[in-house]
Image (cartoon, rainbow, N blue to C red):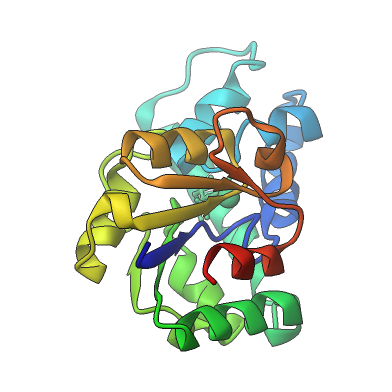
Amino acid sequence: MKAFIFDLDGVIVFTDKFHYQAWKKMADEMGIYFDETINNRLRGVSRSESLEIILERYEGPALSKEKKAELMESKNNTYRELLASMTPADVTEDVRRTLAELHNRGYKLALGSSSKNAKFILEKVQLLDAFDAISDGTNITKSKPDPEVFLRAAEFLGEKPEDCYVVEDAYAGIDAAKSAGMQAVGIGIAAGYAAADVKIQSFGELLTLGA
Ligand code: B16
Ligand code: MG
């Protein structure tokens, strides 16, 4: 194996709580029921697909494309206000040390995130330099479970899919990694997903893979 491709939200940083708060604000304003269980279905999926999942509980009159765009913009504004409070302390020492050590061992490292805010987040936590390539929501047309984001990451690194590990917390991300022909490593919720090739409990365990 030559490279590691990392999901961002739920793997490197825990912005899922901010996504939840921002969507919850929008849902409350619209009178739509929304809870943490529904929020788990939003992991790894795009902003527009997330909105559609939340709207499954909406019972009002049909919403135009423009109104949906407005809702997404408003959610993203709230989300970015919450992200603004992030600092380097929002990345654990375990994550920082493990990334640096994998790099020292000669592995290439890429980000493979569905988020259009990925670079903003990496800047806030000062991790932009830790990656050799970044594939995110700004360079894809289809979101996970489609393999596009990871295939682009491998391409940016100049590596073959079969030489890449993908580290993911979302079921949709594990499915995307498998469709890309990569080795899927499940962490967090995805450590309980049968489709993951490898399951880890802590980020540092990656060092046993990249020995
Ligand atoms: P944005 P990841 C994903 O990030 C999040 O898990 C998902 O909840 C979010 O809807 C998606 O990014 C899009 O994010 O609204 O910032 O473009 O897990 O793929 O790093
Ligand atoms: Mg994730």
Quarter of the picture holding the N terminus: bottom left
Q: Is residue 144 visible?
A: no
**Nearest the eye: 169 or 22:** 169
Identify which residue is drawn at 49% across, 74% down: 120
Depth check: give the residue in front, 115 or 48.
Answer: 115
Image position, residue 12 (x, y; %): 62, 66
Question: Residue 30, how many percent across, how many down?
Answer: 68, 30
In the picture, residue 23 is in which quadrant? top right
Q: In terms of depth relative to the viewer, which is nearer, 209 or 180?
A: 209
**Screen quadrant of the C terminus:** bottom right
Left or right of 91? Residue 210 is left
Looking at the picture, does residue 149 appear above or below residue 107?
above
Q: Is residue 133 above or below residue 138?
A: below
Q: Residue furthest front?
A: 211
Residue 136 in the image: state x and y as whole percent.
37, 59
Can residue 16 be seen in the rendering of this structure?
Answer: yes
Q: Is residue 135 left or right of residue 89?
A: left
Relative horizontal placement of residue 114, taking residue 149 as reference (left or right): right
Q: Residue at x 69, y 41 (%)?
A: 191
Name which residue lies at 30% across and 49% down: 162
Q: How many marks?
A: 0
Estimate the x, y position of residue 129 in percent, counting from the top left.
Answer: 44, 88
Q: Is 129 placed above or below 175 here?
A: below
